[in-house]
Image (cartoon, rainbow, N blue to C red):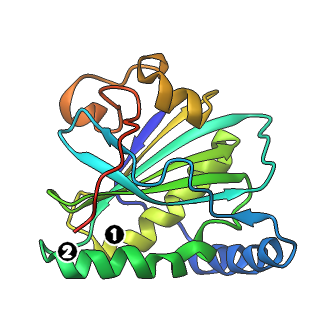
Amino acid sequence: MMTHRDSDRPGTVAAFARSAVATGRLVATGRLASPRTYLHRTFDCIDGTRSFVFRETAIRDGDPRDPVVLVVKFRLWALGRNRRLHALFRRECLLHTPLFAGFPGFQSKLWAADPASGVYRGLYEWDGAEQAVDYANHLGRLLTPFSIQGSVRYHVIPGCRREDFLRDPAMAPAGRGQGVHDWWRLTEPLDAVPVRLG
């Protein structure tokens, strides 16, 4: 379990290039899916954000041997509070799929946004904590120039399935305190009531 702010690891461009190639293979073999299981459902976090799920990406028949939950959070400075820009970003970010789906260990991702704060979250399931951390470090380096300073963070929960994390938030290991240190923690199980987008 760890929390991370802006990262600076070498080889990021090469890592994303390898991911793009691997994503192409997943698409070509029909192994990459866009489930609707959690679409438009909402979840609240301890940091006061209320996010809705606007997309889901998953490996078909994924079965991690070493399940890990990875939660990523960031705010893009260029979008501000412009609702149209955020709506456009939510649509075009489908194009970002090659930047994560081909990383070793990827299993699934919930794409989530909080319209009130402009915070975006990725709630992933990964196979292997080291592989999740490797991806998160590369992602942090990519996101940092485009994000509000200090807003890029990640938290890794080893030995945890995503569904268990969503349905029983209390089971996740404790953070280093409340408030900012537990920004990743859900306050209650995933809300099953869809939200309407403006």
Q: CA distance from mark 1 to mark 2?
A: 10 Å
Residue at the far right: name it: 29
Does residue 137 appear in this view? yes
Is residue 123 or residue 153 the one in the foreground? Answer: 123
* Quarter residue 187 falls in: top left
x and y, in percent, of residue 108 in the image: 63, 52
Please, what secondary structure does the residue beneath circle 1 have?
Answer: helix
Q: Residue 197 at x, y = what percent? A: 27, 64
Q: Nearer the viewer, mark 1 or mark 2?
A: 2
Q: Is residue 5 left or right of residue 59?
A: left
On screen, 196 above or below 64? below
Q: Which residue is mark 1?
A: 144
Name the amino acid type tagged 2: Trp
**Of 17 and 51, the residue lying toward us:** 51
- Spot occupied by residue 24 in the image (x, y as percentages of width and height): 76, 80
Query: Which numbered disc, 1 or 2, marks the residue that appears first in the sequence?
Result: 2
Crowding around mark 1 (Cα neighbors within 10 Å: few <14, some 14 to 19, many 20+) is: many
What residue sits 41% from the left and 37% below the top? 192
Label number found at residue 77: 2
Image: 125 above or below 19: above
Rendered position, 38 above or below 87: above
Which residue is painted at 25% across and 57% down in the image? 151
Query: In this rendering, would 107 be left or right of 86?
Result: right
The kind of residue on which mark 1 rests is Thr
